[in-house]
Amino acid sequence: MNRYPQADIDAVYRAIRERRDMRHFKPDPVDPQIMQRLLEAAHCAPSVGFMQPWRFIRIRSAELRRQLHALVEEERIQTARALGEREDEFMKLKVEGVLDCGEVLVAALMDGRERHVFGRRTLPEMDLASVACAIQNMWLAARAEGLGLGWVSIFDPGKLAALLAMPEGARPIAILCIGHVEAFYKKPMLELEHWASRQNLAELIFEDRWQEH
């Protein structure tokens, strides 16, 4: 009785299968109405204790976008060095599209989260999980709209918070690059680049207790 029509079910699973973490964008602007729908999709996400900890900062200034890109580039170099023998391989990867995409959002955790105890007394990180759900909602909606979205996490959160004048206690989680793309990757980009492979699902599912394979 509660099941969607098969065509709707197929569309949901198609969006899940075809969603990609995009890095290559066209500079064309994003329709404001579509952008609003993506934000509304994010805001429909579940959150622990219904705390709704997500905050989104839309980056409109070209200069500010360049400053964000500089922070990402700074951390990209540090990440490459930390990877040791894979440094050169990492530096060849395209890891962001901050200067290329139509829209840039910064997703953040709100300040004052300590007052939200419901569901967080023993797992305070559930606020982060809630924001991740909001981002995933936006990601799937973007794919359905034919837009690419890339989650950039390569930045110093303290420096980004200062750049965006965030209040004490707020924390940036992601730089989201959103925009039109020539095509969606057939597989996750890091799989295409032979950085990693998708694991076998059967090896990740246990019964009753933790199992070693």
Image (cartoon, rainbow, N blue to C red):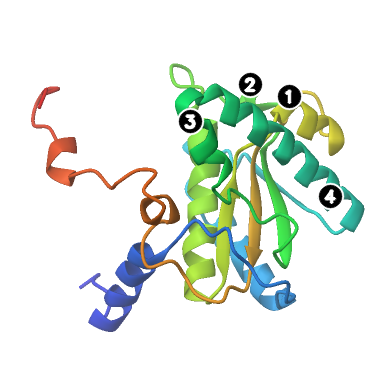
Q: Given the image, on which type of amino acid does mark 3 rest?
A: Met
**Going by the image, does 167 lie left or right of 204?**
right
Q: Given the image, on which type of amino acid does mark 1 rest?
A: Gly
Disc 3 from disc 2: Cα separation: 12 Å
Disc 4 from disc 3: Cα separation: 32 Å
Residue 106, percent from left and from top: 71, 47
Sooner in the amino-acid sequence: mark 3 or mark 1: 3
Disc 2 from disc 4: Cα separation: 33 Å
Disc 1 from disc 4: Cα separation: 25 Å
Above or below, comparing residue 15 to residue 64 in the picture: below
- Where disc 1 sits, the SS reads loop
Residue 160, percent from left and from top: 77, 34
State which mark lies toward you, 2 or 4: 4
Disc 2 from disc 1: Cα separation: 9 Å
- Name the residue tied to disc 2: 114
Asked if the residues shown at circle 2 and circle 4 are in contact, with their CB atoms under 8 angstroms apart, the answer is no
- Name the residue tied to disc 4: 66
For label 1, the crowd category at 10 Å Cα-Cα, with few meaning under 14, some 14 to 19 and many 20 or more, is: few
For label 4, the crowd category at 10 Å Cα-Cα, with few meaning under 14, some 14 to 19 and many 20 or more, is: few
For the residue pair 158 and 165, the one nearer the viewer reads as: 158
- Name the residue tied to disc 1: 169
- Name the residue tied to disc 3: 126
Sooner in the amino-acid sequence: mark 2 or mark 1: 2
